[in-house]
Image (spheres, helix red, strand yellow):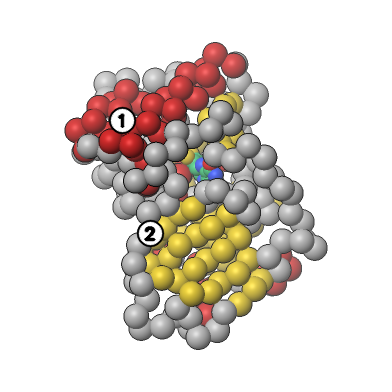
Amino acid sequence: MNQDVPKGVNDEHPDQRGAPVGRRVFLGTLALGAAGVVAAPPLQRGLEAFLGGAADKDPTGLTGLLPNGGGFRYYSVASSVPRKNADTYRLTVDGLVDRPTAYTLDDLKALPQTRLVRDVQCVTGWRVPDTPFEGVRLSRLLDAARVRPTAKAIRFTCFDGTYTESLTLAQARRADVLVALRMQDKGLSHSHGGPVRLYVAPMYFYKSAKWLSGITVTDEVRPGYWEERGYDVDAWVGRSNGRDDDPTS
Ligand SMILES: Nc1nc2c(c(=O)[nH]1)N[C@H]1C(S)=C(S)[C@@H](COP(=O)(O)O)O[C@H]1N2
Ligand SMILES: [Mo]
C-alpha cells in the first residue's frame, strides 16, 4: 500500500467554477488518499458516502452548476504535465506481446475510428451526460501487437509520470474501450489528457487515464494510482466503490 497522501496539486478543481467548490472536492480527495493507507472496506464505504455515494449524490453541488457543454473538471495528480504534439507524442505497446509497437499521433489517426456517446461519471458524484468520445478501439492495438497466451491484464502509464491504470485483458478487449483522440467532437485538449487518453466507457472516469503513453501487457492486474488508494479495480458504473445502486439515476 502506497502511503503517499496525494500532493498539494492533486487538483480536483473546476475548470472555471467557483473556488469554494473546488476546494471541497480537493479536500475530499485528500481524505480518500489518506484512506488508502488503511484501506479497510467499511472505512472505504464511509468515505464514499462522504464523497457522495449516499443520500446526496452530489456533495459538491456541481451537477446543479453544470450546463450544456460544461461539467468536466480538471483532474491531475501530477503538478505539471508536459505538452505533447504530433511530433513528440508516442504511444508504446509492449510487455507480453510478440510485436511491440510505438505509434505516433498520425499512426493512430490513420486507424479506423470509433465514436461512442455515453455519460461520463466520476466516482465523486459529478456526471456529464451524452459525451462523445472518438478514437481507436484498444482491442485493435492489442490484436496488432499479438498478445501472448500467458497475458492476463493491461497496465497503462501516462506521460505525466505519475498516473497509472489497469484493466483485465477481457475488459480491455471490450468494444467500448477506446484509445481516444477526440472528446466532445474536438481534438482532446491538454487538460483533458490530450493528445491521447484512455476511455473506458462502462467504468468510472478514473479508469480513463489521461496523457496515455504506455500500454503494457502483463500477467496480472497491477492496481492503478487510485486503486492503490482504495478505489475498486473493477470500476463498473453503479456496481462498485461501495455502491449497490445506480449513482447515475
Ligand atoms: N493521468 C491522469 N489521468 C486521470 C486522472 C489523473 O489525475 N491523471 N484523474 C482521473 C479522474 S479521477 C477523473 S474523474 C478523470 C477526469 O478527467 P478530466 O480532467 O478530463 O475531467 O480523469 C482520470 N484520469
Ligand atoms: Mo474522478
Residue type beneath disc 2: Arg
Point 50% across, 60% down: residue:
156
Residue 204: percent from left, percent from top: 40, 44
Point 57% across, 79% down: residue:
100
Q: Is residue 245 left or right of residue 208?
A: left
Residue at the front extreme of this rendering: 3
Q: Is residue 11 above or below residue 130?
A: above
Q: Residues within 10 Å of mark 1 (few under 14, many from 20)?
A: many
Position of the C terminus, as image quadrant, is top left
Q: Nearer the viewer, mark 1 or mark 2?
A: 2
Which of the marked residues, 1 or 2, is nearer the chain's N terminus?
Answer: 1
Residue type beneath disc 1: Glu
Residue 118: percent from left, percent from top: 46, 47
- Residue 213 visible in the displayed image: yes
Q: Which residue is mark 1?
A: 48
- Please, what secondary structure does the residue beneath circle 1 have? helix
- Please, what secondary structure does the residue beneath circle 2 have? loop
Point 58% across, 54% down: residue:
158
Q: Which residue is mark 2?
A: 222
Considering depth in this image, is 247 or 6 the residue closer to the camera? 6
Residue 224: percent from left, percent from top: 42, 52
Residue 198: percent from left, percent from top: 53, 56
